[in-house]
Structures are given as structure tokens and as C-alpha cells.
């Protein structure tokens, strides 16, 4: 018999949470709930009904039962629950101590602490959701932008599983046609090879469309890290403040004001963006500033994109070239956008000093900003999206996005189907066709979770939070 698991299902923030939920799932969930919860009056214990009452610590030896919290109880009897098992949720006052105490009471009454993702794993094993939907649950919880949440919700509604199942079914139908000719070739009409080729081409075309969403999906989930670098007093902190529409960084006319990396979280075109304002890079005897400069180089190395910022009033100087060479030494492959800041201080009607032609060849067209006046930010955002080759992601017709695990499985399916095409072209026997078709079908199964191994499931669900 499946044991009963328990976990805190809400984020717990000391002295800030208003409600904390302890979730139970399994055959003893209802009995444990009844042993801890007292519902006054004649409130019936019915499925999908909320009860009001109090949670008590049961009698222990000579100690009478003790009031723990005023709470609500939600009962959901299986199979009409997320896990398709009996589920009880105890809605307590939030914070830290109360929900932790209620969880310990549940464990003392016979439940065990759930493993990470175990509620979602049970929902998958009990047929409530498939593997793509389970992964979408985790994506929805961790979404860092509205667009990422929309994509996760689409996956939860089966918009990824449906096309994968359709492709798998087409391959199964093709396989059955081929195997029938292997076993009963004399009793059936000749195989329509032209139709087989057409079906395989259609499957590969749709598969390539789905695979093309992998990079965008990864950006939507993990976001983009952007480092603002340059020499001191070129307006890096002002640029961060204007972009984030807040006073995240201290701004003064004194070079070297920023001593450490300052972070801000933004959303650009639906993509979560972590912006790092770094200390100005220069030679200095100040030990604290030296540490900040070292961290600036580390930030440039770890960033997905570098915004190299210069002062438009003085143009490209020797110190800029020195810093540029240092940045390129540690961030050789990252895209780099040149930002000409302080355009508002350029003399009216004048053009900023010319940039070296060799620099323009290495970078895309420079972006001109006046961060202190909040000007040029929209152009900067478009340049960032163009640098990661996404264009207007918000307007893109992206209704699904696969993750890295799914992309790896679908890439194997693509390879197998291309091998079938090669086998047909070489006019090999039907038996050879079926080998790679079965491999493609197995790869599709791995995406939705059909026939997947226990070790793979453990790797997937171990990345979930405990209460999911």
C-alpha cells in the first residue's frame, strides 16, 4: 500500500506569510486530518468542502491535547484530487513556527515527509498528468516573467504533449504498415513508399518546428544575464537605474562610486533579465576598489551579454580600449553591445566623437543613450533582443517551448527518422526501416513519460520543490 506523505505546500517567509498550507496525500490522509482537526458544529466531512476549526496536538501520556492553531481544512477524496489519492490540506496562519509545528504533528501521526516533487510524481504515476505536464508544474512555480508563466500553463494544459502524441501515432501507424509487409507480404498490396516518405517528411518538419523552440524556452525559464561594464564615471549606474526604473545604484560625479556588483531583475520582451552594474574597471591602489574591479571582470565572464558603456562626450579613448581588450580576454564569445551614454551632454547639433572602424566591425551598431534623462532605453532593449537573435519575442507566435531534456529526446527522434529516410533511399529491406522507427517512437515516449525508467523520473522530480 502507498504510504501517506506530508509537506509544506507554500513558501514560508518568517513574519511575512499570511497563510501556510500543509498538504497530505495517501490512504491515511483523512484519518490524520481527523486526529488533528476539530470542526465545531455539524460541519460534514465531505469531499471538496472547506471546514473551519482548530488544530490540536493530540493527548500525550498525562498531557492533555493542546491548541496549535485556528485553521481551515480542505478535503479532496481520490480520484478527484491532484494525486488521485485522498488529499487533505491544512490552511494555517503563515510564518514559520505554526506550519512547521503542524507538519511535525502530521509526521507524528504516521505520515512521512515528502520527497522533492513527490506529489507531482504521484500525479504522474497515477495517470493524472503526463511528464510534460509535470515539468510544466515546476516551470509555472519558478516562472520569472508573465510570458514564462503563460508557456508553462500551456504545457500544463497539454499543448506540448498533444503534438508529440500525434507525431508518435503517425510513426506507429507507419511502423505497423511496414511490419505488416514483413509478416504478410504475400497477402497485402505493395507498400506505398511515396506515402511513407511523405509522412516521414511531415513528421520531421513538425519536429523541427518544435525543436526550434528550445533556445527560446531556455531563455524564458532561466533568463538572460547582462553585465554593464566600462571605465569609471561613464554612467553605468545611471544606465541601470534608468533601465530598471528605480534607484538601485548610487550615482555621483565621483569616479569609483560603485565598489561592488549591483543587481536588478527586469523583464525584456517576455525574457527575465538579470542586469549587473559593475564597478568601473581601472588600475587603483584602493584595496576595496580592486576587489570590485575583479568582480566586474568575473561578471563579464559569466554574463550572456555585455553592455560596454563609454562616455559619448569624449568618445573612444585609450582606457576604453584597454578595458575592452580585458573584457574580450575573459568574455571572448559573448555578444557585446557598445553603448554611447551621456548623449544629452553632447553639444547641440554636434555628433559624438567617431569610433574606431575596427571596433564597429566587431560590434553591432552602437546604441546611444542619455541615461540621466531616461532616453534610449527602448533602443537598448531592442538591441539586447537582437543580440541574442530573438527579435520581438513578445510578439512571436510561441505557444509552447521545450526544455533541455525534451530537446535531447526529440533530437534523438529526429536523428532516427532521418536514418529511416536514408535507409529507404538505399533501398534496404523493410526490417532495417523498423529499427530506427522504433527508436524514434521510444524517444517520443521519453518526452511524455511512457515507458520511462525510474532513474530518469528520480532525476526529473528531484529538481522540484518538496511541496509540489
Image (cartoon, rainbow, N blue to C red):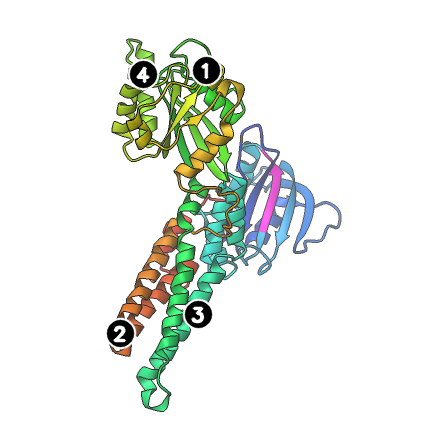
Farthest residue in the front direction?
A: 349
Q: Secondary structure at mark 3?
A: helix
Mark in the foreground, 1 or 4: 1
Decide whether the magenta segment is chiefly helix, strand or loop. strand
Span of residues in magenta: 88-94
At x 47%, y 62%, the residue is: 163
Label 1 to label 4: alpha-carbon separation:
16 Å
Badge 2 crowding class, 10 Å Cα cut-off, few under 14, some 14 to 19, many 20 or more, is some
Label 2 to label 3: alpha-carbon separation:
20 Å
The image quarter in which residue 60 lies: top right
The image quarter in which residue 307 lies: top left
Mark 2 or mark 1: whose residue is earlier in sequence:
1
At x 37%, y 80%, the residue is: 192
Query: Are the two marked residues, 2 and 3, in contact with CB atoms closer than 8 angstroms?
Result: no
Mark 1 or mark 4: whose residue is earlier in sequence:
4
Mark 3 or mark 1: whose residue is earlier in sequence:
3
Label 3 to label 4: alpha-carbon separation:
63 Å
Mark in the foreground, 2 or 1: 1
Q: Find disc 4 in the rendering and name its residue.
A: 317
Q: Position of residue 4 (x, y in %)?
A: 50, 52
User: Does 19 sit above or below residue 158?
Assistant: above
Number of numbered discs on residues: 4
Q: Position of residue 384 (x, y in %)?
A: 43, 34
Q: Find disc 2 in the rendering and name its residue.
A: 432
Of residues 22 and 445, the one nearer the viewer is: 445
Mark in the foreground, 2 or 4: 4
Q: Find disc 1 in the rendering and name its residue.
A: 346
Q: Find disc 3 in the rendering and name its residue.
A: 169
Of residues 107 and 282, the one nearer the viewer is: 282
Regarding residue 278, the answer to whether it shows in the image is yes
Query: Are the two marked residues, 3 and 1, in contact with CB atoms closer than 8 angstroms?
Result: no
Amino acid at each position: 500500500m502507498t504510504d501517506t506523505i506530508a509537506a509544506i505546500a507554500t513558501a514560508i517567509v518568517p513574519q511575512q506569510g499570511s497563510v501556510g498550507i500543509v498538504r497530505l496525500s495517501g490512504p491515511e490522509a483523512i484519518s490524520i486530518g481527523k486526529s488533528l482537526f476539530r470542526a465545531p458544529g455539524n460541519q460534514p466531512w465531505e469531499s471538496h468542502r472547506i471546514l473551519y476549526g482548530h488544530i490540536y496536538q493530540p493527548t500525550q501520556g498525562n498531557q492533555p491535547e493542546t491548541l496549535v492553531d485556528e485553521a481551515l481544512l480542505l478535503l479532496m477524496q481520490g480520484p478527484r484530487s491532484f494525486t488521485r489519492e485522498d488529499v487533505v490540506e491544512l490552511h494555517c496562519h503563515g510564518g514559520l513556527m505554526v506550519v512547521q509545528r503542524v507538519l511535525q504533528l502530521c509526521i507524528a501521526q504516521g505520515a512521512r515527509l515528502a520527497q522533492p516533487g513527490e506529489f507531482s510524481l504521484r500525479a504522474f504515476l497515477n495517470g493524472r498528468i503526463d511528464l510534460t505536464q509535470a515539468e510544466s508544474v515546476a516551470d509555472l512555480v519558478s516562472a520569472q516573467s508573465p510570458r514564462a508563466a503563460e508557456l508553462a500553463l500551456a504545457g500544463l494544459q497539454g499543448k506540448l504533449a498533444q503534438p508529440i502524441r500525434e507525431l508518435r501515432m503517425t510513426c506507429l501507424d507507419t511502423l505497423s504498415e511496414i511490419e505488416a509487409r514483413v509478416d504478410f507480404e504475400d497477402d497485402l498490396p505493395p507498400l506505398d513508399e511515396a506515402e511513407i516518405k511523405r509522412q516521414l517528411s511531415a513528421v520531421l518538419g513538425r519536429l523541427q518546428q518544435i525543436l526550434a523552440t528550445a533556445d527560446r524556452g531556455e531563455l524564458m525559464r532561466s533568463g538572460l544575464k547582462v553585465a554593464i561594464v566600462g571605465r569609471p564615471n561613464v554612467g553605468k549606474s545611471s544606465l541601470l537605474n534608468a533601465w530598471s526604473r528605480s534607484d538601485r545604484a548610487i550615482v555621483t560625479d565621483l569616479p569609483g562610486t560603485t565598489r561592488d556588483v549591483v543587481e536588478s531583475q527586469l523583464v525584456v520582451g517576455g525574457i527575465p533579465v538579470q542586469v549587473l552594474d559593475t564597478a568601473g574597471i581601472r588600475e587603483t591602489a584602493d584595496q576595496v576598489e580592486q576587489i570590485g574591479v575583479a568582480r566586474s571582470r568575473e561578471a563579464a565572464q559569466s554574463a550572456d551579454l555585455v553592455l560596454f558603456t563609454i562616455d559619448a562626450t569624449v568618445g573612444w579613448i585609450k582606457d576604453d580600449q584597454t578595458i575592452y581588450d580585458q573584457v574580450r580576454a575573459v568574455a571572448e564569445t559573448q555578444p557585446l553591445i557598445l553603448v554611447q551614454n551621456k548623449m544629452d551632454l553632447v553639444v547641440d547639433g554636434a555628433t559624438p566623437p567617431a569610433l574606431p572602424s575596427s571596433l564597429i566591425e566587431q560590434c553591432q551598431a552602437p546604441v546611444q543613450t542619455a541615461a540621466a534623462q531616461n532616453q534610449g532605453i527602448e533602443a537598448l532593449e531592442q538591441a539586447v533582443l537582437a543580440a541574442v537573435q530573438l527579435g520581438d519575442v513578445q510578439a512571436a507566435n510561441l505557444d509552447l517551448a521545450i526544455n533541455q531534456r525534451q530537446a535531447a529526446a526529440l533530437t534523438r527522434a529526429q536523428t532516427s527518422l532521418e536514418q529511416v529516410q536514408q535507409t529507404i533511399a538505399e533501398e534496404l529491406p523493410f526490417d532495417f526501416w523498423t529499427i530506427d522507427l522504433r527508436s524514434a517512437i521510444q524517444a517520443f515516449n521519453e518526452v511524455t513519460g511512457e515507458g520511462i525508467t525510474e532513474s530518469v523520473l528520480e532525476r526529473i522530480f528531484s529538481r522540484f520543490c518538496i511541496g509540489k
